[in-house]
Amino acid sequence: MVILYWISAYLLGTFLTALWIGKWKGVDLASSGSGNPGARNALSVLGHRASFLVFLGDFLKGSAVVWAGLWLEFSLVAVAVAGLLAVVGHIYPLWRKGRGGKGISTFAGVTFWLTPDLFLAMLVLSFAFYPWLKSATLSMLAGFSAFFAVAFALQVQSVVWPLFLAIIVIVIRHKENLKVSLEKRFPAKKA
């Protein structure tokens, strides 16, 4: 039963809200703007309302994976694995040859319900660092650091280790964004 749950979590993750919102608005977000089927690209191409709907859809699919796992009374580790698979499905959907979104909204939906204390720490530190870093991508790293730190402080790493893997996958997916953000925020000094 748990294997079926995990497969379903991955498949639900592959449902890319941005592509449906874009279709509804008559725009292919996969070939517009940055080409990323996510909330940030929806914001730049379609505006705030579409961006919010994309975020909400991706957040809710992460939430649904947690709700289903808790309702089925699976262990917290099994639910965390499903959360990881939902994020991986969003980032690497088989039906799009692995060209999906970046996973933040889905990860937020998973952690909001499964680990609210870690989610809160991540959110607070992300917002706290934003005024200094002036980059959502770099602030995300600060938030992820808080997620790890609080998990170890509360000694729940044995339960949430799949979410650590999800963070690693998300950071890898953001590699180019991180490089650009670092160069903008901390430009190399010329001799």
Image (cartoon, rainbow, N blue to C red):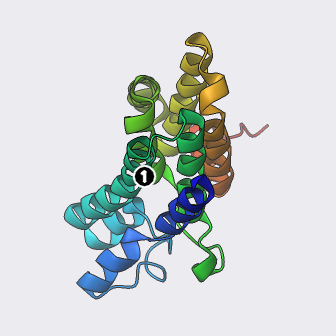
Residue with the most extreme left position: 49
> x%, y% of residue 94?
63, 76
Residue at 64% in and 40% down: 162
Q: Is residue 183 visible?
A: no
Residue 63 position in % (x across, y down) = 37, 49
**Residue 109, placed above or below residue 86:** above
Q: Residues within 10 Å of mark 1 (few under 14, many from 20)?
A: many
Residue at horizontal 40%, vertical 85%?
A: 28
Q: Is residue 153 left or right of residue 115?
A: right
x and y, in percent, of residue 36 in the image: 50, 69
Disc 1 marks a residue whose amino acid type is Gly
User: Which sits in the foreground, 185 or 162?
Assistant: 162
Q: Position of residue 122 (x, y in %)?
A: 46, 29
Q: Is residue 29 above or below residue 61?
A: below
Most extreme residue toward the right is 191
Res 147 → quadrant: top right
Quarter holding the C terminus is: top right
Q: Secondary structure at mark 1?
A: helix
In the displayed structure, 2 sits above or below 117; it is below
Residue that sits furthest to the bottom in the current view: 26
Q: Nearer the viewer, residue 159 or 170?
A: 159
Q: Which residue is mark 1?
A: 62
